[in-house]
Image (cartoon, rainbow, N blue to C red):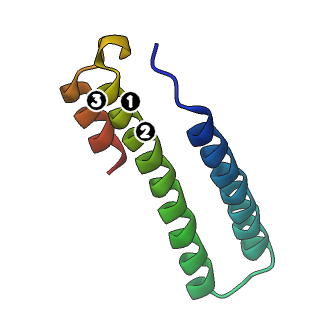
Amino acid sequence: MLKFPDDVQDDVQKRLRRLEGQIRGLQAMLEDGKDCRDVITQLSAAKSALDRIGYRLVGAGMRYCVTNADEADGITSDELEKLFLKIS
Protein backbone atom coordinates (compact mmCIF):
# COMPACT_ATOMS: atom_id res chain seq x y z
CA MET A 1 0.00 0.00 0.00
CA LEU A 2 1.29 3.44 -0.92
CA LYS A 3 1.39 5.74 2.10
CA PHE A 4 2.44 9.34 2.17
CA PRO A 5 5.49 10.43 4.16
CA ASP A 6 4.78 12.04 7.53
CA ASP A 7 5.89 15.49 6.37
CA VAL A 8 3.48 15.34 3.43
CA GLN A 9 0.63 14.15 5.65
CA ASP A 10 1.31 16.95 8.13
CA ASP A 11 1.44 19.57 5.38
CA VAL A 12 -1.78 18.32 3.77
CA GLN A 13 -3.58 18.18 7.13
CA LYS A 14 -2.64 21.84 7.76
CA ARG A 15 -3.80 22.81 4.30
CA LEU A 16 -7.10 20.95 4.77
CA ARG A 17 -7.74 22.67 8.09
CA ARG A 18 -7.07 26.04 6.43
CA LEU A 19 -9.40 25.09 3.58
CA GLU A 20 -12.05 24.05 6.08
CA GLY A 21 -11.87 27.56 7.52
CA GLN A 22 -12.20 29.05 4.04
CA ILE A 23 -15.32 26.95 3.40
CA ARG A 24 -16.84 28.07 6.69
CA GLY A 25 -16.02 31.64 5.71
CA LEU A 26 -17.81 31.15 2.41
CA GLN A 27 -20.87 29.83 4.23
CA ALA A 28 -20.85 32.87 6.50
CA MET A 29 -20.47 35.20 3.54
CA LEU A 30 -23.52 33.69 1.89
CA GLU A 31 -25.54 33.82 5.10
CA ASP A 32 -24.56 37.46 5.57
CA GLY A 33 -25.54 38.35 2.00
CA LYS A 34 -22.07 39.45 0.94
CA ASP A 35 -21.40 40.79 -2.54
CA CYS A 36 -21.35 38.17 -5.31
CA ARG A 37 -17.88 39.22 -6.45
CA ASP A 38 -16.44 38.72 -2.98
CA VAL A 39 -18.04 35.30 -2.64
CA ILE A 40 -16.77 34.17 -6.04
CA THR A 41 -13.28 35.46 -5.25
CA GLN A 42 -13.21 33.43 -2.03
CA LEU A 43 -14.66 30.40 -3.79
CA SER A 44 -11.90 30.63 -6.37
CA ALA A 45 -9.28 30.80 -3.60
CA ALA A 46 -10.75 27.70 -1.93
CA LYS A 47 -10.79 25.82 -5.22
CA SER A 48 -7.15 26.72 -5.85
CA ALA A 49 -6.22 25.56 -2.35
CA LEU A 50 -7.92 22.22 -2.94
CA ASP A 51 -6.11 21.86 -6.28
CA ARG A 52 -2.77 22.53 -4.58
CA ILE A 53 -3.53 19.85 -2.00
CA GLY A 54 -4.20 17.34 -4.76
CA TYR A 55 -1.01 18.27 -6.59
CA ARG A 56 0.97 17.92 -3.38
CA LEU A 57 -0.37 14.41 -2.84
CA VAL A 58 0.15 13.25 -6.41
CA GLY A 59 3.63 14.79 -6.48
CA ALA A 60 4.56 12.96 -3.29
CA GLY A 61 3.21 9.74 -4.75
CA MET A 62 5.24 10.19 -7.90
CA ARG A 63 8.43 10.88 -5.96
CA TYR A 64 7.83 7.83 -3.81
CA CYS A 65 7.22 5.56 -6.78
CA VAL A 66 10.33 6.80 -8.58
CA THR A 67 12.62 6.41 -5.59
CA ASN A 68 11.03 3.25 -4.15
CA ALA A 69 9.83 1.35 -7.21
CA ASP A 70 10.22 -2.02 -5.47
CA GLU A 71 7.94 -0.88 -2.61
CA ALA A 72 5.41 1.10 -4.67
CA ASP A 73 2.77 -1.62 -4.35
CA GLY A 74 2.47 -2.10 -8.08
CA ILE A 75 1.46 1.46 -8.86
CA THR A 76 2.52 2.19 -12.40
CA SER A 77 3.39 5.51 -13.98
CA ASP A 78 0.18 5.21 -16.02
CA GLU A 79 -1.86 4.95 -12.83
CA LEU A 80 -0.10 7.98 -11.37
CA GLU A 81 -0.80 9.91 -14.55
CA LYS A 82 -4.49 8.99 -14.31
CA LEU A 83 -4.57 10.18 -10.70
CA PHE A 84 -2.95 13.45 -11.74
CA LEU A 85 -5.47 13.93 -14.54
CA LYS A 86 -8.34 13.37 -12.11
CA ILE A 87 -7.35 16.45 -10.16
CA SER A 88 -6.38 18.69 -13.05
At x 55% / y 77%, what residue is drawn?
Answer: 40
Gap in angstroms between the C-alphas marked 2 and 3: 10 Å
Tell whether label 1 touches label 3 (CB within 8 Å): yes
Q: Which residue is mark 2?
A: 60
At x 35% / y 21%, what residue is drawn?
Answer: 68
Figure disc tally:
3
Front tag of 2 and 3: 3
Give the amino acid at mark 1: Tyr
Gap in angstroms between the C-alphas marked 1 and 2: 6 Å
At x 37% / y 46%, what residue is drawn?
Answer: 87
Q: Which element type, helix, strand or loop, lies under badge 1? A: helix
Residue 7 image point, x, y percent: 60, 40
In the picture, the disc for residue 64 is: 1
Indicate the quadrant where residue 65 lies. top left
Give the amino acid at mark 3: Val
Left or right placement of residue 58 versus residue 43 in this view: left
